[in-house]
Image: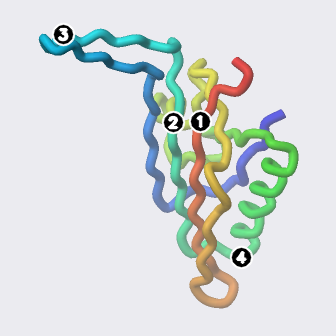
Amino acid sequence: MPVAFPNLKPSARSYSPGEYPQTAFQAQNGAVTVVRFGSRRVDSTLELTFNNIADADASSILQNYEQVNGVWDSVTFTTATGAVGTAGSLAEFIEESGGSGLRWRYAGPPRLTSIKPGFSSVSCSFVGVLDGV
């Protein structure tokens, strides 16, 4: 069962909806044929940055990483928690809740930078994968 990301609003985010799996073949005369291998997007990416947050909040992100990867699960983001930092139709894309079938997984471990005692900045990268669909 997917694990909810902590209720923290990012300072910055970067999102790419991914691509449809396909290969283009070009003939010598310039004609192009495209072979599509599926009808769903793959490899969405999401990067969230949390600047100058309390160490306790930074720790909750690290705990989430451990919890998700300890059982090879996925992460969910919801508008209610504000984790994606937006609302409305844009949030549906970032949450991948519009029927894309993608599940967010950590692309790597969170990167933590200590700012001053008691405060840190954390960057997280996620990739959207089709898992058993």
Local SS, label 2: strand
Q: Is residue 124 left or right of residue 16?
A: right
Which residue does the numbered mark 2 point to in the structure image? 44
| Image position of 16 with respect to 30: above or below | below
- Which amino acid type is shown beneath numbered disc 2? Ser
Local SS, label 4: helix
Q: Position of residue 25 (x, y in %)?
A: 30, 16
Colour scheme used in the picture? rainbow
Q: Position of residue 113 (x, y in %)?
A: 59, 78
Q: Earlier in the sequence, mark 2 or mark 1?
A: 2
> Number of marks in the image?
4
Local SS, label 1: strand
Distance between the alpha carbons at the discs numbered 2 and 1 = 5 Å
Q: Within 10 Å of the Cα at label 2, are there few (<14), some (14-19), or many (20+) other Cα atoms? A: many
Q: Within 10 Å of the Cα at label 1, are there few (<14), some (14-19), or many (20+) other Cα atoms? A: many
Q: Nearer the viewer, residue 86 or 50?
A: 50
Residue at screen point 67% across, 43% down: 105
Residue at screen point 62% across, 77% down: 120
Q: Position of residue 89 (x, y in %)?
A: 47, 28
Residue at screen point 53% across, 18% down: 40
Nearer the observer: mark 4 or 2; the answer is 2
Quarter of the image where one finds residue 64:
bottom right
Q: Earlier in the sequence, mark 4 or mark 2?
A: 2
Nearer the observer: mark 1 or 4; the answer is 1
Q: Nearer the viewer, residue 101 or 115?
A: 101
Extreme residue in the left direction? 29
Q: Earlier in the sequence, mark 3 or mark 4?
A: 3
Task: Mark 2 and mark 1 in contact? Answer it, CB < 8 Å.
Answer: yes
